[in-house]
Amino acid sequence: MSEAQAEFAERMNRMLNEASLALMVSVGHRTGLFDVMAQMPAATSAEIASRASLHERYVREWLAAMTAGRIVEYDGAAGTYALPVGHAALLTRSAGMNNLAAGTQFIGLLAQVEDQIVDCFRRGGGVPYSAFPRFTELMAERSGAGYDATLTDVVLPLVPGLTGRLQQGIGVADVGCGSGHALNLMAETFPRSRFTGFDLSDAAIAAAREEAKRKGLANVRFERRDAAHLGEDGGFDFITTFDAVHDQARPDLLLAGIASALRPGGVYLCVEGAASSELAENLGHPRGPWLYTISCMHCMTVSLAEGGMGLGTMWGEQAARKMLGEAGFTSVEVVHRAGDDDAYFIATKD
């Protein structure tokens, strides 16, 4: 075996280990084991299982994987396990938007459709949204902490003068609103404004309405609507989409509908992953392999399943600017924030 082959073999072994650990980290998140261990001193597998109300044999094997993966520390003499404070800060629910364990759940979700994706490679077409039963739930968990931390204080102020207008009272829509947390948060923060959320998923709309009811919000409503056929004419002053354009079957119709739905002087804020439309310019992207993978196995394929354009997760800034222009927007400003994986497209029309 050549030196280059040996290095690649070593890399493949690391990949198998890391991919396996991703599944186990997802299990630790879903079972609450990281949250439990963060609140405990070094403890035996039996003590950890008891605190988490889980079966000890499974917990012990999970702890072995975590120990071998250098995520959990193990004292062989005492037979105890401990989650380092620095690791807990990135693996527990109390970490909020810094919780990296939540994202590992997507590995198992994507794996469930591998057979169907392989079939699509041979026959074309795509895998529909219905094949991803937990997708809305996982997206809500992933984005919710981020909205709580940055939406009203960081993201909305990126649009000049917007916060003041929201405080005075304007009409706002969120297209592809999912479970509605972003819109409910805005409605709660700006009680004089009126908010409408549109999404095609019955489950998402039900969750959005339930949260609004729980918060006692009277200035927000949610409608089941195909984003490609909004049918609104100049009814809104501000419209948002959060990571909701690239996986649409007809993102061109969505963007045109948003342009039509804005009043004169209205603003559209399109939040999408920061990337280039050119592969060569994404080779240094810190999450490039992950984003192209989730594109192939979810974002692109759900669009193609509806006979759509299949833009994919990494459609990029150049394509976004072009499509926004074709939709009728005459001004597009793109804002990038240091340490932020998203790009913020602020679009207006004459």
Image: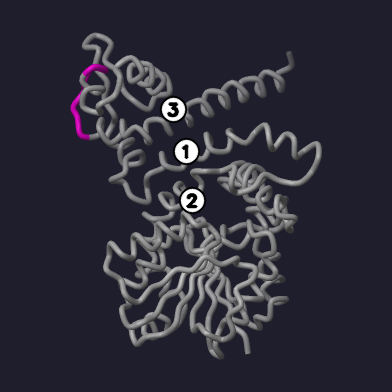
Under mark 3, the amino acid is: Met
Q: Are marks 3 and 1 in contact (CB under 8 Å)?
A: no
Residue holding disc 2: 136
Residue holding disc 3: 24
Magenta stretch: residue 293 in it? no
Residue holding disc 1: 105
Q: Which residues are magenta?
A: 39-46
- Residue at 67 percent of width and 24 percent of height: 8
Gap between marks 3 and 1 measured at Cα: 10 Å
Secondary structure beneath label 1: helix
In the rendered image, residue 143, in percent from the top left (x then y), is placed at 43, 55
Under mark 2, the amino acid is: Thr
Magenta stretch: residue 44 in it? yes
Gap between marks 1 and 2 measured at Cα: 12 Å
Of residues 140 and 202, the one drawn nearer to the viewer in this rendering: 202
Q: Earlier in the sequence, mark 1 or mark 2?
A: 1
